[in-house]
Amino acid sequence: MFVDVRIYSLPPGALPGYVARYAKEGFPVQQKHGFNCLGYYTTEVGVLNRSIHLWAWDSVAEREEKRAAMGKDPAWQAYIGGNKDALVAQENKILVSAPFYPMKNTNPGPIGVVDFRTYHVKHGRLPEFVKLYQEEGMAIQNGHLGHNIGWFTSHIGMQNQVLHLWAYPSVEERAKRRAAMVADPAWQAYGKKSSALLTSMENALIVPAGFTQPKG
């Protein structure tokens, strides 16, 4: 599976109105053209005034074909026309799902907040990092955190990245589960190995938009 991750930045105060208009005018057009939305979010903690959305495709060619058809749709053209000067910046990257994704979620439940994590891996070490995680880290993390809704690696765009998303009922539940994981000696041993393969880590807490339910 290929995933198009798109991050749109808006001026302060403009995000709620933008998302409301998109839900009413933009999202239905994308659904009509067969777009598969894995999740549409807004930032709660991190860089604010952002919408983050993920789209699944069977191939890059399918993405190009359906986006081209949508671009010719008068309804989409009208929606885009109304967005002039609405955005400060847009960015996207194409990722591929890890061989072990989707995982079996051990703590499924309502999604109140999502931890959106991006890890930057040392050049040439991405396969090693993924292999180490699959063999030693995945079972521990999934046991403690338990609701993974995405685990991807870079394909087009900035390279040597891992992006993974973990869902929680609340910020308080996230803190509780992560504290237990960090205290686990097995996770500590794995962390010493995995951190040696990374150059930096970043995350944001994002919340689902009301018009779509995250998949995973």
Image (tube, rainbow, N blue to C red):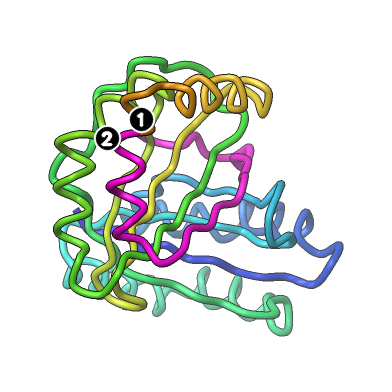
Whole-percent x and y of residue 196?
32, 57
Q: Which residue is mark 1?
A: 187
Residue positioned most to the bottom: 85
Secondary element type, mark 2:
helix
Is 106 within the magenta?
no
The image quarter in which residue 173 lies: top right
Whole-percent x and y of residue 186?
31, 25
Q: Callout 1 environment at 10 Å: few (<14), some (14 to 19), or many (20+)? A: some
Mark 2: amino acid:
Gly
Mark 1: amino acid:
Trp
Secondary element type, mark 1:
helix
Q: Residue at the spot x=61%, y=45% of the render?
A: 206
Q: CA distance from mark 2 to mark 1?
A: 7 Å
Horizontal relation, residue 46 to residue 7: left or right: right
Height in image: 164 above or below 14?
above
Whole-percent x and y of residue 131?
14, 47
Is 206 within the magenta?
yes
The magenta-colored residue range is: 189-216
